[in-house]
Amino acid sequence: MFRRKSFTAVSMSVIVGGATVFAAVALSGGVANAAATTFNPVADTYVDNGNTSTNYGTSGQFGIDNSPVKRTFLRFSVSGITGTISSVKLRVHTDDVSGSQSGNGGTFKGVSDTTWSETGTTWNNQPAIDGATLGTLGSVSRNAWYEIDVTSYVTGNGTYSIGVTSSSSDGADYDSRESGASTAPQLVVTTDAGSTPTPTPTVTPTSSPTPTVTPTVTPTPTVTPTSGDAPVLVGAGDISNSGSGDTATAALLDNIPGTVFTLGDNVYDSGTTSEFNTYYNPTWGRHKARTRPVPGNHDYNTSGATGYYGYFGASAGDPSKGYYSYDLGSNWHVIVLNSNCSAIGGCSAGSTQEKWLRADLAASGKPCTVAMWHHPRYTSGSNHSPDTSVAPLVQALYDNNADLILTGHNHQYERFAPINPSNQLDNARGIRHFVVGSGGASHYGFGTILANSEVRNSDTYGVLKLTLNPSSYSWQFVPEAGKTFTDSGTTACH
């Protein structure tokens, strides 16, 4: 079983009445208002048949096992929920695991008894774990978050107990509520407060490299209007190849004004001039004149990324560097970095790019800053792990109070809470990270969900629209036509 404690920050937003609340917007023939509220347990403990009269209610962890038998109990009080519940997720954080550090995560069931005492429950007087099975976890790793869907059980305001058991002698330990807010269990309740119909915009057919005309045009999702004259950044990464979703995402750009960004891997597989002309140019290429690109690792599969630099020209910056910056509106500074570190002399502290970044930030007189590159510092994607090589760039941005980081590489969408360079929640100076690898390349799945990951999707192509207000930014994930996933919100600049 577990041998040491560790703490990993969790995602939080506005705290209301002891619960954490954040909002999201979903589009499905209209604008639907959704909100997620996070509750911590009001009680948790475990029991052990090797110590039948011992209470573990004040322990910083709780365990499950089958040798000796250990069972865990959690109780949540859900209140203040309005609207229809669309999903409820129980999130637990592993403290450590036994032996090889890959224990069995256990079986989660409902418990009808909601009156058991955190400081009085022992093996001898434990409540019966008598409810339906809510979910199971297989092999788990230490210091990681795991989710169980308990929507069928938590149906509204009230008190809910959950029991956790394991049939394996190689069980797991989880951080309890006594471990602190950063690792305590969470019950995340998402509600749909209803929808307001919105008119579907007329879609104007766009030019195509083929003469085929489709008789019926699928409506393009409604896009939130730009706030006044605030500039707009819109784009994604991981975009074009034969049969990709780039046609669908390019159609979204047709209806969104502003500066287009890419987040690398603009074409697959090798970033050749032929691939740019064959795949990218007929789709996203029609917005080339307003595009400021980012290079990805596939773009560098052609030596020196000559296909990428040749296609985008001066808009891509110096071909020997690939990093550059520009301003948008009166208050925003945009920085494009090159995370293909080995191709440009590194990204480490003291490297040419890192020193350029710090000088550029120091020279900028803009109060709001967004930076973008290809490889994400933090990601929950299963295909590509968090990239430590870009950590010095993140540190430089944090030191200079930057607001946003946009990346791609994993073919999915993920949004993090404002965090410091160590992925700890920091609502004062933290940078909000996005992974927007949803431009068209085939989707990747998620693995271990990192702390402070707030929203994820792995089955929808789409673009991220950023409205850069004078002292804040608003984001909206705009999905491909026919899909309903979206994500939106607003945050003030530092």
Image (cartoon, grey):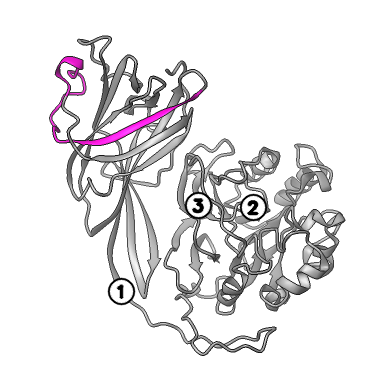
Q: Position of residue 336 (x, y in %)?
A: 71, 56
Say if residue 480 shows up in the picture.
yes
Residue contact between numbered discs 1 and 3, judged by CB atoms under 8 Å: no
Please state, as top left, top right, bottom left or bottom right, where the N terminus lies in the image.
top left
- Residue 169 drawn above or below residue 227: above
Q: Which residue is mark 1?
A: 196
Q: Give how far apart the Cα atoms at labels 1 and 3 are.
A: 25 Å
Crowd tier of the residue under label 1, counting other residues whose Cα lies within 10 Å: few below 14, some 14–19, many 20 or above: few
Q: Earlier in the sequence, mark 2 or mark 1?
A: 1
Q: Residue at x 50, y 39 (%)?
A: 448
Q: Which of these two is toward me, 309 or 210? A: 210
Looking at the rendering, the stretch of residues picked out in magenta corresponds to 101-126
Q: Position of residue 30 (x, y in %)?
A: 36, 74
Q: Is residue 125 magenta?
A: yes
Q: Earlier in the sequence, mark 1 or mark 3?
A: 1
Mark 3 residue type: Arg
Number of callouts in the render? 3
Crowd tier of the residue under label 3, counting other residues whose Cα lies within 10 Å: few below 14, some 14–19, many 20 or above: many
Mark 1 residue type: Thr
Q: Which residue is mark 2?
A: 409
Crowd tier of the residue under label 2, counting other residues whose Cα lies within 10 Å: few below 14, some 14–19, many 20 or above: many
Q: Give how far apart the Cα atoms at labels 2 and 1 are.
A: 35 Å
Decide if residue 428 is on the left or right side of residue 15.
right
Q: Earlier in the sequence, mark 3 or mark 2?
A: 2
Decide if residue 181 is on the left or right side of residue 301.
left
Decide if residue 90 is on the left or right side of residue 344.
left
Q: Which of these two is toward me, 487 or 401? A: 487
- Residue 255 drawn above or below residue 7: below
Q: Which residue is mark 3?
A: 415
